Amino acid sequence: MKTWIVTGLLVAGLSAAHALDLTPITSYRELEGVRIPVISFEDGLRKVNWQPPDNWQLSGGGQQLNLYPDKIALAAAQLKLIGHDAAQIPARTGALNDFFKWVMSFVPRDATGLTFDHESPNPFLLGGKPSREITVSYVSAAKKCSTSVALVDLDARQSLALVITACTEDFEQVYSAGTASMFRWQWVTKTLTPQDVTASNAPASKAPR
């Protein structure tokens, strides 16, 4: 019984102490005996296996991962973690106007002629969790551009935003590749290691008797 209690407290402590970290780690997954290269992210007692679009360059990590499609000028994407304590984040199921105002924060400051294109209620699922997306168009640096922002509530603490931007003439190609990659996002439960146990043994205040 004591072992169960200690293990349960350890698991709960590790789950609470860690959140998704978008620092990419080179890894692989196996499919019918074949190793497929993937990127993995740490997420407490789980990890994420993800296949980004082919030939997209990655940079950053932690709270934001930046992606750049090969040989497509002015195209970029971001995976961005946003805490629910951030005052500006709207409820995923909130009013369209509030969501649209929030999406505008991802548009370049020099943008003019901002146009609402469309809303997609659920362009992809992450672990069964629905998403919501808005796409807008505008002119920036004398170029007609488009930006889509999709939001997924991961848990009670944080959401994940997928932001895709490209010149309007390239947008459909970039958007299709970026969105399709989210269907290759997979959470995997990790085996508890001695390192996890050691890391959890930080000094803690005693509970009152």
Image (cartoon, helix red, strand yellow):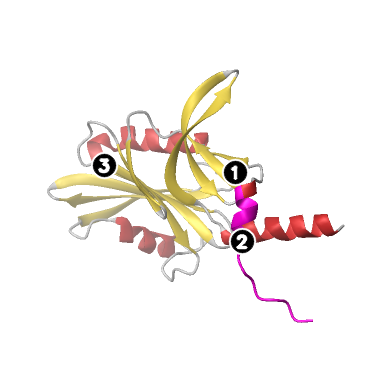
Which residue is found at the position 20% from the left and 56% from the top?
A: 111
Which residue is found at the position 64% from the left and 47% from the top?
A: 194
Residue 79 place in picture, x, y as percent: 40, 48
Inter-mark Cα distance, 2 to 1: 19 Å
The kind of residue tagged 2 is Ala
The kind of residue tagged 1 is Gly
The reply to whether the C-beta atoms of the residues labelled 2 and 3 are less than 8 Å apart is: no
For disc 2, the neighbor class at 10 Å (few under 14, some 14 to 19, many from 20) is few
Residue occupied by mark 2: 16
* Extreme residue in the left direction: 142
For disc 1, the neighbor class at 10 Å (few under 14, some 14 to 19, many from 20) is few
Residue occupied by mark 1: 127
Which residue is found at the position 80% from the left and 59% from the top?
A: 5
Residue 100 place in picture, x, y as percent: 38, 59
The residue nearer to you, when weighing 116 against 170, is 170
Q: Which residues are magenta?
A: 195-209
Q: Nearer the viewer, mark 3 or mark 1?
A: 1
Horizontal side of 194 relative to 144 (left or right) equals right
The reply to whether the C-beta atoms of the residues labelled 3 and 1 are less than 8 Å apart is: no
Residue 122 appearing in the image? no
Give the overall secondary structure of the magenta segment. Answer: loop
Residue 202 included in the magenta stretch of the image: yes
Residue occupied by mark 3: 166
Nearer the N terminus, badge 3 or badge 1?
A: 1
Please, what secondary structure does the residue beneath circle 1 have? loop
The kind of residue tagged 3 is Ala
Inter-mark Cα distance, 3 to 1: 27 Å
Horizontal side of 169 relative to 43 (left or right) equals left
Inter-mark Cα distance, 2 to 3: 37 Å
On-image quarter of the N terminus: bottom right
Horizontal side of 54 relative to 74 (left or right) equals right
